[in-house]
């Protein structure tokens, strides 16, 4: 697994659900792994490298969207 720290501008659960339903990316919220507070996403390293890279691009685009909303 890879742990990705993101700005805590949206709840982890909200971000995870948006990524799943709107971006087609499955990640886990940090609280599944007892990370304290908001702003942690956990990504699987099992997909092939191209699929993983596309998933990370989608995660970063979603984070940028939340930052733009402010």
Image (cartoon, rainbow, N blue to C red):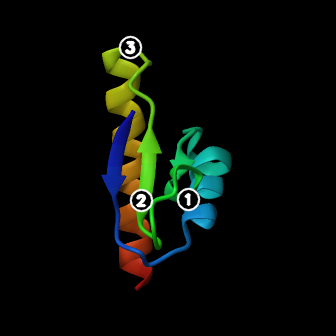
Disc 2 target residue: 40
Relative side of 33 to 4, left or right: right
State which mark lies toward you, 3 or 1. Answer: 1
Q: Image height check: is 9 above or below 40?
A: below
Position of residue 40 measured from the top left corner of the image (x, y, whole percent): 42, 59
Asked which secondary structure carries label 1, the reply is helix
Position of residue 50 measured from the top left corner of the image (x, y, whole percent): 33, 19
**Lower sequence index among marks 3 and 1:** 1
Q: Residue 54 lies in what quarter of the image?
A: top left
Task: Decide: few, some or many residues near mark 2? Use Cα within 10 Å; few <14, some 14-19, many ≥20.
Answer: many
Position of residue 43 measured from the top left corner of the image (x, y, whole percent): 43, 38
Q: Which residue is drawn at 45% across and 68% down?
A: 36
Q: Image height check: is 9 above or below 2?
A: below
Q: Which of 70 and 40 is in front in this view?
A: 40
Q: Residue at x 65, y 55 (%)?
A: 17
Locate the C terminus and report the quarter of the image it occupies: bottom left
Q: Residue at x 62, y 66 (%)?
A: 14
Disc 3 target residue: 48
Q: Distance between the residues labelled 3 and 1?
A: 26 Å
State which mark lies toward you, 3 or 2. Answer: 2
Task: Decide: few, some or many residues near mark 1? Use Cα within 10 Å; few <14, some 14-19, many ≥20.
Answer: some
Q: How far apart are marks 2 and 1 (CA)?
A: 8 Å
Locate the N terminus and report the quarter of the image it occupies: top left
Tag 2–tag 1 contact (CB < 8 Å): yes
Relative side of 7 to 41, left or right: left
State which mark lies toward you, 2 or 1. Answer: 1
Asked which secondary structure carries label 2, the reply is strand
**Lower sequence index among marks 3 and 2:** 2
Position of residue 15 measured from the top left corner of the image (x, y, whole percent): 55, 61
**Lower sequence index among marks 2 and 1:** 1
Disc 1 target residue: 31
Task: Decide: few, some or many residues near mark 3? Use Cα within 10 Å; few <14, some 14-19, many ≥20.
Answer: few
């Amino acid at each position: 697994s890879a742990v990705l720290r993101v700005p805590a501008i949206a709840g982890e659960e909200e971000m995870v659900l948006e990524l799943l339903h709107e971006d087609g990316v499955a990640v886990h919220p940090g609280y599944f792994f007892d990370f304290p507070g908001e702003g942690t996403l956990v990504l699987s390293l099992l997909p092939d490298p191209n699929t993983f890279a596309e998933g990370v691009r989608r995660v970063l685009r979603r984070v940028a969207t939340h930052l733009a909303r402010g």
